Image (cartoon, helix red, strand yellow):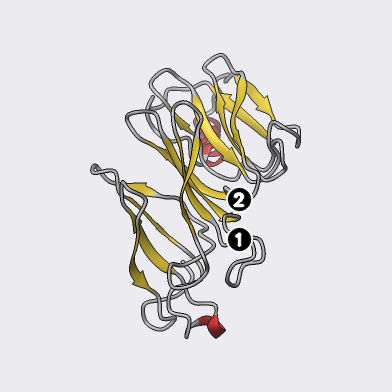
């Protein structure tokens, strides 16, 4: 897999989403108008399935200096995923390699605060072999500007939820919000739970805001 840049006028602060669909749309417009303007396509980094990471599933975001940040679902020093930076000069730097206890198999976009701290989630890892998850039920983590990672919450797969497969939202007070696909109401989903909506405050305390019942409110977000 590769990380690329297509030179065109875009917002300097927007998340780089659906680049291929946008490129196809613009090409279609150019063909319809009878002219195609040359674009410069540059590969910034090609992942090698090793220490640099592999399987970058989620969106990138860009800071004011032009650096890009993202995560991979695998690779790194232990094979369990990475958080990486690609500098404005196109050089990749691994900020953290996950080892399992801090999370593995990352999903969901990262978020960043004004101090440069990164927040994200892993589907698996955390507290190994606790509850219904053999490899852990996932984590919410913080990677600070010195590249120190802190697990804010390790899911158990119980009433607190487990196996989050989407990104986080962060409010102006620093609280994080997200969803999990299992846990919560353990009478739902044949005993595995149907997922929760949760909040994690600035001190790392998790609060379940809603446990899905699998009926009219849905299940496994």
Q: Quadrant location of the N terminus?
A: top right
Q: Residue furthest left?
A: 173
Which image quadrant for residue 145? top left
Relative placement, left or right, of 48 versus 136 is right
Q: Percent from the top left, x then y, of residue 6?
A: 55, 25
Q: Residues within 10 Å of mark 1 (few under 14, many from 20)?
A: many
Q: Nearer the viewer, residue 12 or 96?
A: 96
**Residue of label 1:** 136
Relative to 20, say whether 220 is above or below: below
Question: Residues at badges 2 and 1 in contact (C-beta under 8 Å)?
Answer: yes
Task: Count every numbered label the image shows and give the total.
Answer: 2
Q: Residue furthest top?
A: 89
Q: Nearer the viewer, residue 47 or 202?
A: 202
Q: Percent from the top left, x then y, of residue 221?
A: 46, 66
Relative to 186, say whether 7 is above or below: above
Mark before the other along the chain sequence, 2 or 1 = 2
Relative placement, left or right, of 4 versus 112 is right
Residue 87 tag number:
none
Q: Percent from the top left, x then y, of residue 30?
A: 52, 30
Relative placement, left or right, of 36 versus 169 is right
Give the structural element (helix, strand or loop) at label 1.
loop
Measure how far apart labels 2 and 1 are at the Cα level.
8 Å
Residue at x 69%, y 39% (from the top left corner): 54
Residue at x 41%, y 50% (from the top left corner): 168
**Residue of label 2:** 101
Q: Residues within 10 Å of mark 2 (few under 14, many from 20)?
A: some
Q: Percent from the top left, x then y, of residue 9?
A: 42, 22
Give the structural element (helix, strand or loop) at label 2.
loop
Relative to 80, say whether 32 is above or below: above
Relative placement, left or right, of 101 versus 139 is right
């Amino acid at each position: 897999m590769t990380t690329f840049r297509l030179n065109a006028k875009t917002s300097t602060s927007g998340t780089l989403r659906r680049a291929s669909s946008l490129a196809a749309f613009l090409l279609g417009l150019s063909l319809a108008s009878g002219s195609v303007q040359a674009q410069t396509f540059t590969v910034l980094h090609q992942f090698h399935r090793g220490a640099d990471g592999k399987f970058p599933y989620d969106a990138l975001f860009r800071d004011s200096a032009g650096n890009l940040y993202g995560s991979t679902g695998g690779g790194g020093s232990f094979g369990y995923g990475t958080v990486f930076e690609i500098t404005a000069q196109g050089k990749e730097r691994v900020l953290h390699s996950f080892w399992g206890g801090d999370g593995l198999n990352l999903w969901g976009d990262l978020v960043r605060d004004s101090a440069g701290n990164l927040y994200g989630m892993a589907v698996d890892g955390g507290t190994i072999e606790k509850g219904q998850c053999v490899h852990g039920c996932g984590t919410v983590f913080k990677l600070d500007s010195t590249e120190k990672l802190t697990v804010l919450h390790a899911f158990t797969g119980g009433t607190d939820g487990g196996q989050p497969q989407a990104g986080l939202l962060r409010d102006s007070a620093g609280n994080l919000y997200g969803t999990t696909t299992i846990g919560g109401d353990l009478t739902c989903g044949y005993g595995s739970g149907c997922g929760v909506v949760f909040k994690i405050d600035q001190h790392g305390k998790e609060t379940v805001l809603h446990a899905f019942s699998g009926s009219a409110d849905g299940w496994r977000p």
